[in-house]
Image (cartoon, rainbow, N blue to C red):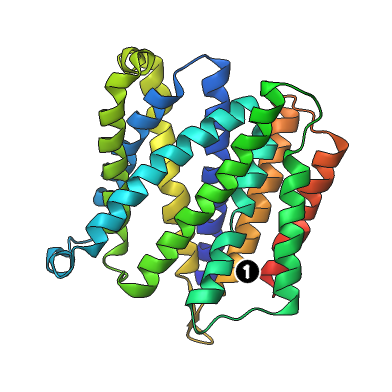
Amino acid sequence: MLKLFNMYFLLLSIVSSSLIIVVFKLIGRYRANTLSAIIINYPVACIAGFFLANSSPISELTESYLWFYIAAFLGVLFIGMFWLIGTSTIKAGISITTVAAKMSVIIPITYSIWIDPNDSLSIIKLSGILLAIAAVLMAVYKKGNGAQSKQALILPLSIFVGLGIMDSIVKYSQLNFLTSSLTPIFTASSFGFAFVVGLLILPFNHSAAKDMLKLKSWIIGIPLGLLNFGSMYFLIRALAHINIESNSTTVSSIIFGINNISIVALSVLIGFTIFKERPTKLNWVGICLSGVAIIILAYS
């Protein structure tokens, strides 16, 4: 039964993450303002986090203020990365953006090898990292000249680096001060800080401020917030699964591998069938290689 629940949560994480990209694509199609939808999404995600928290460990939070500064910095990264993902989905395409986002996992892997004494670099893992870098470059490459083609290249690469840094910060937090009881509050607080940052920059974007009052921005922003929170929450639940036979947690690398590969595959399928995207042959090669690279990293 526990194995069934584990796969159930993993499936929900995969679907949530894939649908986030789809929502961003719909923002472009229906000409909604990306920033306004992003700003609306964060209080929804924040409320969902506090709602699902079983308790509020205030005593643990007040023991150190380090969590406050890290959560605030993550809030800035959250809204910045979400804006980049939304813009890249519209400019570069759904499949290429997804690959760049998912392959950013090689950065926290490298960081973990450096900071975590229980992790190490093997020949297989190094091969997976190098293959992943090559896969990202091939997946995001597009022929053509001008600002449009350059933007379609820079945006996914920026997502690759930015998400990698963000995940590395989360890894540092978990390794140094986060506990299981603090995790949902810390996550919800990061979403809350992202909302504050969004409100601060809103006056400088008149179109976004105007669209905040439109119904379509809320129709898009609310499900986006639920999917944003769900993608993290369900993945954590899948990772927290305990095998009653060995009394150990599920191997995280396998869960991450299955999660990333499935998101890439599902997003490419959605982009190809629903949005009629046509990646180049080189893009397809990069997408296929990314799956191979994730498999190698998962079993390294």
* Residue at 30% in and 54% down: 71
Viewer-proximal residue among 276 and 98: 98
Rendered view: 28 above or below 44: above
Q: Residue at x 36, y 22 (%)?
A: 218
Q: Residue at x 54, y 57 (%)?
A: 10
- Would you name the residue on which mark 1 appears? 254
Residue 1 image point, x, y percent: 51, 69
**Residue 69 in the figure: left or right of residue 264:** left
Residue 63 appears at what percent x and percent y? Answer: 14, 70
Amino acid residing under circle 1: Ile
Is the residue marked by circle 1 packed among few (<14), some (14-19), or many (20+) residues within 10 Å?
Answer: some
- For the residue labelled by badge 1, is the local secondary structure a helix, a strand or a loop? helix
Q: Position of residue 208 (x, y in %)?
A: 37, 18
Closer to the camera, 8 or 169? Answer: 169
Q: Is residue 177 left or right of residue 133?
A: left
> Eyeballing the image, is 239 above or below 140?
below
Relative to 29, say whether 175 is above or below: below
Q: Quadrant of residue 215?
A: top left
